[in-house]
């Protein structure tokens, strides 16, 4: 102990003096009240009470003696001098210590109503951030997949409805576009040298398209929307029977007359022998048309 411990005092003054010694020694060793409380397994307010020499609110005297002895051993204070202070603070037969010693107020304790600082593990923060990022990515991917599936299902339903409604088309929706005498002659001459039709799925060059469009029996179909298309030649052979993409071009020649079935007439254009073919419209937007017939 330092010089302050050479002349032990009595009563509350001895408790205050011992508390000052404990406080100064703790600071000299670079310890905080919180560290001392953690090592002694005591609340920080009890450590502050011992350093202030105010034992009001603490347990019985026998426990206070134990706390002070443990604190002194932690600070490596002289045991003999500690006993002298304890004899002055706790005289034999005095059981009213906690009442006689100065009262403790909340303002007198530095740690009263304050939380001790606890360092939050950084690795746990990294893990939580990683989990959060993973959850956001998963939610975004799940939403994107669900949206794509919904759009695909909707498109499939629309196309299926188009194909189904074709069988219900009334006879009044069927339009036959006759060929002229000169077109029939050209068709007969062309048919002797051609037995197969040509389908261009939008990949034919512009020059080839213009050449075919200029032929007297060439059929050109261009949809603005995805639609069902079925085309049969004069022998009943099906030249195409599938869902075609919007903006594609489909050309056929040398096998007129053609029977055309459209699942969606909206925005679709048909040309035969270089002339536009009128497409009958109805609520179902479907049509069956024969072009190049008598």
Image: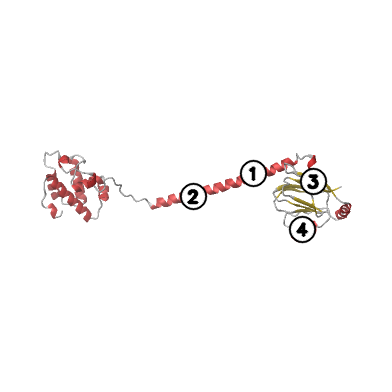
Q: Which numbered disc, 2 or 3, marks the residue that appears first in the sequence?
A: 2
Q: Residue at x 53, y 49 (%)?
A: 140
Mark 1 crowd level (few <14, some 14–19, many ≥20, 10 Å Cα): few
- Real-space Cα distance between discs 2 and 4? 52 Å
Residue at mark 2: 134
Residue 154: numbered disc: 1
The circle on residue 289 is 3
Residue at label 4? 209
> Around disc 4, counting alpha carbons within 10 Å, would you say few (fewer than 14), some (14 to 19), or many (20 or more)?
some
| Cα distance between the residues tagged 3 and 4 | 22 Å
Marks 1 and 2, how far apart at CA: 30 Å
Q: Are the two marked residues, 2 and 3, in contact with CB atoms closer than 8 angstroms? A: no
Q: Secondary structure at mark 2?
A: helix
- For this rendering, which residue is in front, 44 or 39? 44
Q: Circle 3 sits in a helix, a strand or a loop, which is it? A: strand
User: Element at badge 4?
Assistant: helix
**Callout 3–callout 4 Cβ contact below 8 Å:** no
Question: Percent from the top left, x then y, of residue 113?
Answer: 28, 45
Q: Is residue 12 left or right of residue 135?
A: left
Pointer 2: residues within 10 angstroms few (<14), some, or many (20+)?
few
Residue 260's tag is none
The disc, 3 or 1, on the residue closer to the chain's N-terminal end is: 1
Q: CA distance from mark 1 to mark 4?
A: 33 Å
Judged left or right of residue 125, residue 255 is right
Mark 1 or 2 closer to N-term? 2
Residue drawn at x 41%, y 51% is 125
Which numbered mark, 1 or 2, is in the foreground of this view? 1
Q: Is residue 69 visible?
A: no
Q: Are marks 1 and 2 in contact (CB under 8 Å)?
A: no
Disc with the residue nearer the chain's start (1 vs 4): 1
Q: How many C-alpha atoms fall within 10 Å of the one at disc 3: few (<14), some, or many (≥20)? A: some
User: Horizontal and vertical percent for residue 207?
Assistant: 76, 61
């Amino acid at each position: 102990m330092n010089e302050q411990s050479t002349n032990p005092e009595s009563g509350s003054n001895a408790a205050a003096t011992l508390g000052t010694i404990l406080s100064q020694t703790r600071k000299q060793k670079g310890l905080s009240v919180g560290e001392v409380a953690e090592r002694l397994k005591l609340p920080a307010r009890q450590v502050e009470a011992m350093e202030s020499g105010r034992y009001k609110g603490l347990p019985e005297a026998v426990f206070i003696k134990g706390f002070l002895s443990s604190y002194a051993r932690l600070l490596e204070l002289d045991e003999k001098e500690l006993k002298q202070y304890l004899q002055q603070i706790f005289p034999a037969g005095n059981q009213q210590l906690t009442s006689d010693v100065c009262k403790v107020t909340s303002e007198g304790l530095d740690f009263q109503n304050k939380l001790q600082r606890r360092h939050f593990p950084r690795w746990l923060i990294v893990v939580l951030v990683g989990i959060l990022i993973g959850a956001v990515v998963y939610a975004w991917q799940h939403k994107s997949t669900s949206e794509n599936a919904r759009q695909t299902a909707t498109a499939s339903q629309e196309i299926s409805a188009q194909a189904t409604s074709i069988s219900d088309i009334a006879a009044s929706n069927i339009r036959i576009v006759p060929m002229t005498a000169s077109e029939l002659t050209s068709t007969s001459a062309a048919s002797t040298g051609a037995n197969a039709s040509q389908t261009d799925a939008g990949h034919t060059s512009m020059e080839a398209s213009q050449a075919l469009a200029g032929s007297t029996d060439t059929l050109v179909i261009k949809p603005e929307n995805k639609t069902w298309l079925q085309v049969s030649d004069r022998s009943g052979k099906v030249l195409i029977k599938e869902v075609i993409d919007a903006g594609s071009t489909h050309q056929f020649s040398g096998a007129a007359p053609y029977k055309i079935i459209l699942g969606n007439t909206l925005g679709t254009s048909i040309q035969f022998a270089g002339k536009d073919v009128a497409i009958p419209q109805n609520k179902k937007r479907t049509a069956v048309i024969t072009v190049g017939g008598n």
